[in-house]
Structure formats: structure tokens, C-alpha cells
Image: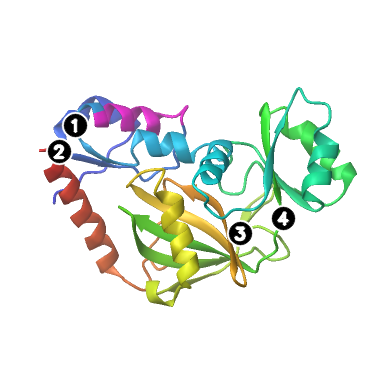
Amino acid sequence: MDTEQIGAKDIHRLAEFDGLFIRETTGVNHHTFHMALKAEREGLAVIDDPNSILRCGNKVYLQTLFEQHKVPMPDGIMLFKQDEDNLERAADTLGLPLVLKIPDGSFSRGVVKVKTLTELRSQLSVLFEQSAIILAQRYTFTEYDWRIGVLNGMAIFACKYFMARNHWQIYKHGKAKTESGGFSTCAINEVPAHVLDAAIRACAPIGDSLYGVDIKQDGDNVYVIEVNDNPNIDDGVEDLFLGNKLYDMLVEDFIRRIELKR
């Protein structure tokens, strides 16, 4: 397989290629979505495909989808800007602390934890300036999140992402820099079966593309936090266990998709 690195300015060239592999944080109001849409219309094999970008890019939509398909997830409710009882409903239903999320946040941005009613009131005011709908979820402490890489319905890599120092998330955004916690890459057969099962079930109603599923494990309980349509695959991190075999799997799947298009 020949590859060429292209950018947003090359959208007019997409018909020259057989496949498009997007390696940039995606968004609906972003050139990545427009390129994915155009590539799909041109008959290319596309990862991330437009439907996956649409579905994974909205945490509120994912919450509804997981409820419909009985995917294990934290208890959560939707809060709407026009409702006057948001504060009481969130606190009474989920308790404190809880987590608030805007629909299109990524890399821990637009996601906050509140511990008191005062914090809840303040953060609701801030987040409703960014979105008319906020997802509130019950908070569960874990030392790490599982990230399960899923391609075409099959788990291909597994990592534990540890929380940033003195923080409750993997990423800690500061004014000057962003800090992140450590990681531990695992063989797929080392991952608890119920964690893998939750990851596969979470991806099934979204599509057959490449996904990174974030899962919290609390003993026998697992909670799918979100499904990412553009998961990191970094040298020496997600590929640490499989090495080049991981990239062979990606290339082989692209060839399969291209042949199906033909």
C-alpha cells in the first residue's frame, strides 16, 4: 500500500486515492468531517467515516444510544438550559459529587466535576453558555481508565490510562501546559472479559470503524464513559505490546474495505 500525507487544502484531490485515514481530532463543524463526507461520496474507504464522527462527537447522543442498547454506563440525566429545576434534579437524582459534560467536549475539555451545590450552580451557568444541553453523570473514582481499541468489531489494543497527578482526569489542563497521567499497555487476553464485552457492545450501534472505548472498572462493575472515533495510536504507547503488527492490522483492514468498495 502506498500512502501520502495530505491536509485540509487537499480536499479537491480526494478522488485520486482509494482510502482516507484521518489522524486529527474530528468535529462536525470542522474540515475533517467535510473531508470524510466528500471521500465517502467519492467511493473511498474512510476511517473515520462521517457517521462515526457524528455519533461519537455528541456525548448526549451516545448516552441515549447506550441506554437503548443496554450498554453499561454511569447513571446520567440530561439538563436543559430552559429548565429551572436543573440544580435540584441533578443533585437529587445523582448525588454529589457528579460530572457535567457538554456534548462535544474532547480530551477532558468541557468536562467538570462538582462536589457541592455551590459548584454545581456555578458550573451549570458556565457550561450553559457553551451548550443548551448538558449531560450530568454519577461520579465514580478509579485510578485509571481502560482504553480499548476496536476495529471492525474486534478489540485490537488495550491500555490503562492513569489519572494526572493530583487530578481526577487523565488530562489536567493548566494555563501554561497540559499534564497527563501515565499508561500501561496490555495484551488483549489480559483484559477482563466483561471490560472487552462492554467495549464491543458500545461500538456495535455506532459502526464498524476504528474506535477507542473509554471504560471505568469498579470491581465487577464496568461503565462505558465514551467512544472516541479518532483514538490515539502513538509510538510506544498503544502499539507497545503488538508493535508493527498493530499497523499491519490497520492496513489489512483498509485493503479489505477498498476491495469491498470495488
Measured Cα–Cα span from mark 3 to mark 2? 38 Å
Measured Cα–Cα span from mark 1 to mark 2? 7 Å
Q: Is residue 101 above or below residue 211?
A: above
Residue 36, percent from left and from top: 32, 33
Measured Cα–Cα span from mark 3 to mark 4? 15 Å
Precedes in sequence: disc 1 or disc 2: 1
Counting every numbered tag in the picture gives: 4
Choose mark 1 or mark 4, whichever is in front: 4
Secondary structure state at the residue bearing disc 4: loop
Which of the labelled discs sits on residue 139, or is there none? 4
Precedes in sequence: disc 2 or disc 4: 4
Q: Name the residue carrying label 2.
A: 261
Residue 179, percent from left and from top: 62, 58
Which of the labelled discs sits on residue 43, or is there none? 1
Q: Amino acid at mark 4?
A: Tyr
Q: Amino acid at mark 3?
A: Ile
Q: Name the residue carrying label 3.
A: 170
- In the depicted view, which residue is nearer to us: 109 or 60? 60
Q: Is residue 46 left or right of residue 191?
A: left
Q: Are marks 1 and 2 in contact (CB under 8 Å)?
A: yes
Residue at left offset 76%, top offset 22% = 82
Q: Is residue 231 visible?
A: no
Q: Amino acid at mark 1?
A: Gly
User: Which residues are the magenta region?
Assistant: 28-40
Choose mark 1 or mark 3, whichever is in front: 1
Q: Amino acid at mark 2?
A: Lys
Q: Which class describes the residues within 10 Å of circle 2: few (<14), some (14-19), or many (20+)?
A: few
Residue at left offset 73%, top offset 65% = 166
Precedes in sequence: disc 1 or disc 3: 1
Quadrant location of residue 61? top right
